[in-house]
Image (cartoon, helix red, strand yellow):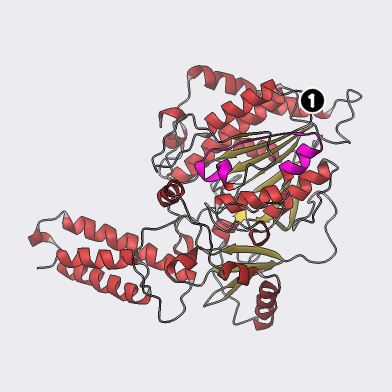
Amino acid sequence: MGARLFSRRNVFGLVLALAGLALVLFFAGSRTGRDERTSGVPKLILLLSIDTLRADRVGPQADGTSATPELDKLATVSRRFTQARSPIPLTLPAHGSMLTGLYPVHHGSHDNGEPLEEGPSLPDILRAAGWRTAGFVAAAVLEGRFGIARGFDTYDDGWLSGESMQGVRQRSCEEVNGSAVRWLRARDDAPTFLFVHYFEPHRDYVPPSPFAERFEGDPYRGEVAYADHCAGALLGVLAERDLLHEALVIVTSDHGEGLGEHDEMTHGLLTYESTQHVPLLIKPAGSTESSVDDRFASLVDIAPTVLAAARLEGAEPMDGIDLLAPPPSEPRTLWAESRLALKWGATPAAVAYRDPLKFIHGVRPELYDVRADSNETRNLHGDRPEDARALAAALHEAGILEAMSAPSDTALDAQTREMLLALGYVREETGDASPSEPIDAKDIAYAYSRYAGMKGTVTYQSKLPPAKRDLRLIRAVAQEADRLHAQLPRVQLLANVAADARLLLP
């Protein structure tokens, strides 16, 4: 926690830098004759990824306030993509898609801790063309040993704080900025690709002051505001060094956060818009105005967009497209997936997007018009069977379902397993029985949401004297936990909470 607190000197310096940001952008846009970079290749390309950032938490909210004033400023000179999607709601494979332009089915990483397969990446291609490539990441889930560092001259996954309330090595966005800025100040004049990753607002949500006080009662939004502050500080340094106006800047997130919607508190298991819809801002070099692009886009489009700006081509085709080029005439189909449910013996989620529809494969398949129903409250699967069949067929033809159904052959080492367990991506389950009938990933999410409530009830009742315990409520918890465990035998925590409840009965 202490590593996140600001010193008075740092705050004063950041205020000065941020105060000048808008003026630097304005006056830089009016320069003429000083260089020709505006119409050519940018000398700096910045990819900033803000982990776990929901698209609907960026910009002004219903109450008129915004937790992202710095990103709002950047949006005034950027193209804002309102319908950008993550291909997978997990940090490592999602960033793999950003840096390879490939879906997980093609880059080989479907889960945190599962390394990317060998193959060309965006940093590889840029470095071969003479670019300096540097990455600065905030959490151990993106350690270079997972293949994500391929192609970087410098890949900083070292840790200044070495601490986390979750037991996972990570560092604050301020510390990431510090490392990135020190590297920038030592760089030469070669064209530069800079990848920066913040872990806020990933859980646990413990924003530092003054963001904790400003967003009291909504710590997730407080961490969003803290990450936005850091983004503004980094952009301010680029502006001070006369790099920002002529830079290509891309700001996005690997995935969103459930926050209780559809029974998912965090992310990784389900593929609803709360975790799939991500912010995406692209500021072209020399841009002085904003625009809105509402076509469906994906994180796999980032690498092709960067390569096009650098006037480079990869040796192998990518799944994405250049988002700054005219859109293709044919409608695109985008993919998303999560096979985390396989760990509980459930059918994993797979998604096909074809504007405006979204099809979710599962035991109980779903179809939504996500433009008209962004909260996915009305399942159209029964009303539009032809559309559902067409998108289901597309998932099969693309090989998405087959790739997801194959169990991973990656054996987690003790360090990786401990890290993923702390993050909540793996569970200490001991039940081995297989379900008698196929179960849906939604059932796993529901079970865990019910478990959290039942566990809280049992914990509270255990603290009361026996004479004051609510025996009817305790019996109801035990019965409900037994019922759910019978349906989901691999969710051993349900059996545990049922047993704990019965211990409180006379």
Residue 392 sits inside the magenta stretch: no
Viewer-side residue, 225 vs 358: 358
Quadrant placement of the N terminus: top left
Q: Is residue 250 left or right of residue 413?
A: right
Tell me the crowding category of disc 1: few under 14, some 14 to 19, or many 20 or more residues within 10 angstroms, Cα based.
Answer: few
Q: Secondary structure at mark 1?
A: helix
> Was residue 140 drawn as part of the magenta stretch in this picture?
yes
The quadrant where residue 471 appears: bottom left
Count of numbered circles in the view: 1
Q: Residue at x 66, y 72 (%)?
A: 395
Task: Say left or right for 494 vs 96.
Answer: left
Where's residue 199, x and y in %? 52, 41
* Residue 42 x %, y %: 81, 34
Q: Nearer the viewer, residue 183 or 390?
A: 183
Task: Please report the residue visible at 52 percent of the width from the left and 17 percent of the height from the top.
Answer: 9
Determine the residue positioned at 68% across, 53% down.
299
Residue 128 appears left or right of 257: right
The residue wearing badge 1 is: 27
Q: Is residue 76 above or below residue 268?
A: above
Identity of the residue furthest to the top in this view: 9
Q: Position of residue 388 (x, y in %)?
A: 65, 78
Q: Is residue 425 above or below residue 347?
A: above
- Residues in magenta, as a range: 123-145
Amino acid type of disc 1? Phe
Quick check: 2 left or right of 82? left
User: In this orientation, does residue 222 appear?
Assistant: yes
Q: Nearer the viewer, residue 136 or 478?
A: 136
Pick the residue in front: 101 or 277: 101
Q: Is residue 359 visible?
A: no
Quadrant the C terminus occupies? bottom left
